[in-house]
Image (cartoon, rainbow, N blue to C red):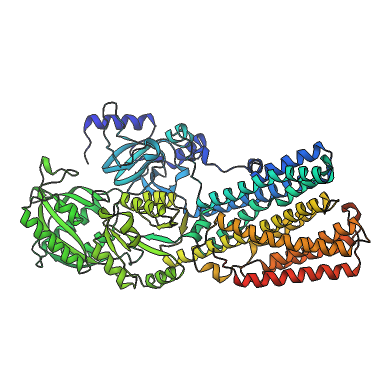
Amino acid sequence: MAWAPEAADTRFRALRLLETGPRGLTEAQAESRLLAHGDNVVPLRRPLSWPRRLARSLRDPFTMVLLALGAVSALITSWGTVGVIVLLVAVSCLLRSNGEHRAARSMAALRELVTSTVTVRRRPEESAEPREREIPVDELVPGDVIKLGPGDLVPADVRLLRASGLTVHQAPLTGESAPVPKQAHDLPDGEDHLLWQGSSVASGTAVAVVTATGADTLFAGAHQAPARKPSAFDRSVNGISWTLVRVMLVIPPIALVANALLHGKGLEALPFAVAVAVGLTPEMLPVVVTTTLARGAARLAREGVIVKRLPALHDLGAIDVLCVDKTGTLTQDRPVLSGSVGPDGRADPEPLRWAAINSFWTLHLTDPPTPDPLDEAILGGALDPGEVEGVRATPFDPTRKISCALVRSDAAHIVVVKGAVEAVLERCALSEQHRVRAGEVARALAEAGARVLAVATAGSSARHRLGEERDLRLIGFVTLVDEPSPEAAAALAALAGRGITPKVLTGDHPATAARVCRDLGLRVESVIDACDLTPENLERATVIARCTPEDKARVVTALRAAGHTVGLLGDGSNDRPAMRVADVGICPRSAVDVTREAADVVLAAKDLTAVEHAVLAGRRSTGNIITYLRIALSSNVGNVIAMLAAGLVFPFLPMLPIQVLVQNVCFDAAQLSFAFDRAVPATLRRPLRLRPSGILRFIAGFGVLNAVVDLATFAVLTWGARAEGQPAFHTGWFIENLLTQAVVMLLLRPTVRVSRPLGLATGALAVVGLLLPLSPVADAFGLVALPAGSYLWLLLVVVFYGGVLLAINRRTNWNR
C-alpha cells in the first residue's frame, strides 16, 4: 500500500517524536523504556494488597453487626462477651482475607497461562533486520511497532501507520455500539488514525506505533474500571445476609422487653440478648463461601479449566441453557469442499476459481494474515487460478458477511467478492427473475446440508472500491460440508442428561445447521432465522440461524429475561457481545484476545465435555454452600427460638452469655468442614442455584423442629436437674446443643456418606461438648459435671432427634 507524501510526513513525524521508526525499536531500547515507563498495566486493575483485603472484610454485614454488639457489651462492661466477639471477628476476617488472597494469587497465576500477547516488530541491534514476535502485552513500551488483526484487543494507545478495512469496537470508551471505521491517514481535527487501549478490532488489519502505555493511556486516565454488575450468586447471598441482619437487629430489643415485663430484669438481661443475637450470626458464611468456590476452581485448574471470577462457579452449576456456535464446537472446524455450481445450479469450475483467488489474496494481503477454515478448504480443492496478481484485500467481516479482494488480471483490475448468499446477492446487478432463481438454487444447496458461499466479480472502478461493492456480476456458488465432531454427540447427550438445553447460534443457513444437529442426535424442535426472533419462538428453538454478533447478544438477553441461567461458549470476536451479557461466558484458550478477556471461564480446548466437567464442579460447590446455609442457619434459628422461649418461661437465663458464645465458636469452627464435603449424585443431575426463598423456607421448618427438640431438652433438664440447680441446667443444654449440632451436620445433608474432614469436625464437636464440663476450665465457663443419669436422658433426646432427621432426610428434595 503506497503512502501519499503528505500522509507519510505526518506518520514519520509521529515516529520521530517517539524516537522510533517503521522497523521498530531495538531490544536494548525497549528494555530501557520499560524501566522508564513501567509495565503496561492499568493501575486500577492491580490486585489488592493483603492489608487492604483484610480491611475490606470488615465491611461484611455480619461483621459490622458483631462489632456493634461488641461495642454494646463493652458499654455494659461484659468483657467476656467482648472477648469472644472480638475472637469471632478476628478469626472470620483473617480466614476470609487469607482465602481471598490465596484465591486471587491462584487466579493471577492461572491467568498467566492465558496472558494476552501482541505481535511486535523489534531488532536485536541497530543494524539488524526487524523480527516479528509475540510478547506479553505488559512488556509493550512507547515506540513499539505492532500488528493488529480481527479479535485483537488494542493493548495501548496507538497511532496507525497502515490499515486495511479496519473497524474497531470502542464502546468501553465512547459508548458507540457499532464498529467504527479507522484509517491510517490524518483528517483535520479527526481521530480516525488513533486507537485507544480498551478498544478491540472488529475487522481488518493494521500496523501501528504505540504512543502511550499503562497509566498514561486515555483508558487509565479518564475511565474507572467498570464495576461488574452483581451476579445471581451475589444477589442471593446478599438477600439471605440482609434478611438475617434485620432479624438480628430485632432480637435484642425483644429479649430485653420480654425480660423486663415478665421478670423485672432490664439491662441485666442485655448480655444474654447480645449473646442470642451473636448466636444467630453465621460469621463463617464469607469464609465457607470463598473456601468452597476456591477449592472448586483449583480442582478445575488441574483439568486445564481456568475460572477467572469465583462466583462464576456457582453460575456454571446453575446453567440450564447453553448457547454454542456450530463451527468448531459441533463440527471439526475443518469444512470440506463439496462442489462448485453456476447461478443456474449446474456444475461449473468458475465459481471455485474466483473463490480461490479471493481466499488466496485475502490471506496473503492481510497483515497479519487471518487464516480461515473456509478459505483453507477452498484453496485445498481449487485448481491453478492462472496469472492473477493481488493488489488489496479486506478479510471477512462478520457484520457485512463478505470478504473482498482487488486483483489485476491481463492489465485489468477486478473486484472479487465472496461471502454469505444474501450479502452477495444484494450487491449484484440482477433482474428480479434471476435474483429469485439464484436464491432458489442457493436454498436447495443449503437444504441438502451444504454450507453455501456466493461468489461475484466486477471490473474495478470508482463505484467498485473495496468497502463500497455494488452492481456485481454473480459467478455462482461454492459449497462445503462440515464433518460432525466425534465427541459432540456424546457430550450433547450428557449435557441434556444434566438438565441443560443446548441452543445453536450460527451465521449459517438454517437447513445447514439443522442437518448437523440431527446428525449428532440432537432433537431439533424448531429452527428460526435471527430476523424472525420473538420471545415465544425462541423458547422452542434449537437452532437460531443467520446470527450477527448483535443477534447473539439479543438471544442471550431474551433467554435471561425469560428466567434462564445462560452460558455461552464461543471463541471469535463475534461472540464477545453475547459473552458480555451471558450469566457465564466460556471460551477455549485458543480464543481471540478480546473474547478471552471477556470470558469468565477459559477451557483448555473448545470441548463440550470440558463444559460438562466445569458445570459439575459448579454444582458441587453450590451444593456444599447450600448445605452449609441450611444447616448453620436452621440450627442457629432453632437455638434462638428456644432461648427466647426459655427466657420467657424460666425465672433464670437458660444459658449464660459466655456459654452461648463458646458454643457458637465451636460450631463455627466445625462448619468450615462443609467446604470439603462430598457431593451427592442427586445434586449433580439438575441445574442448582442458590434460591433465597427455598433456603429461608427450609430454615423456618427445620429451625422450628430444632427448637422443639431444645424445648424437650428443657423438660428433661427441669425434671432431672432440680437438685443440681441452674449450673446443671446450663451445662445440660450446652452439651445437648453441641451434640445435636454434630448430629445435624451429619444427617441434615443430601447424603449420609461422610467425608473425612466432616467426620473429624463433628467428632471434635461432640468431644468438646462431653469433655469441656469435666475439664479444668469448666468453672471459667460456668459448667459443672453432670450425674450419669442426666447423660443418659440427653443421649435419648439426641438419638430421637437423629431418627427424626434421618426419616425426614429420605423424603426431602435436596435440589429445590
Residue 157: quadrant of the picture: top left
Note whether residue 672 is visible. no
Residue at 55% x, 67% y: name it. Answer: 683
Q: Position of residue 747 (x, y in %)?
A: 68, 68
Residue 224 falls left or right of residue 248: left
Q: Residue at x 68, y 41 (%)?
A: 64
Left or right: where does residue 55 sit relative to residue 651?
left
Q: Please name the residue shown 51% across and 34% down the image.
A: 36
Regarding residue 488, the answer to whether it shows in the image is: yes
| Residue at image location 81% in from the left, 46% down from the top | 262
Task: Tell me if residue 75 comes above or below residue 803 in the rendering.
Answer: above
Count numbered badges in the picture: 0
Q: Position of residue 364 (x, y in %)?
A: 24, 52
Q: Is residue 245 above or below residue 306?
A: above
What is the x, y in percent for residue 40? 47, 40
x and y, in percent, of residue 565 in the image: 45, 57
Q: Foreground residue, 636 or 207?
A: 636
Q: Nearer the viewer, residue 303 or 751?
A: 751
Please tell me in which quadrant of the rendered image residue 421 appears: bottom left
**In this rendering, position of residue 28 left or right of residue 736:** left
Quadrant occupied by the N terminus: top left
Please tell me which residue lies in front, 660 or 615: 660
Q: Is residue 715 above or below residue 551?
A: below
State the residue lying farthest toward the right. 723
Picture quarter containing residue 176? top left
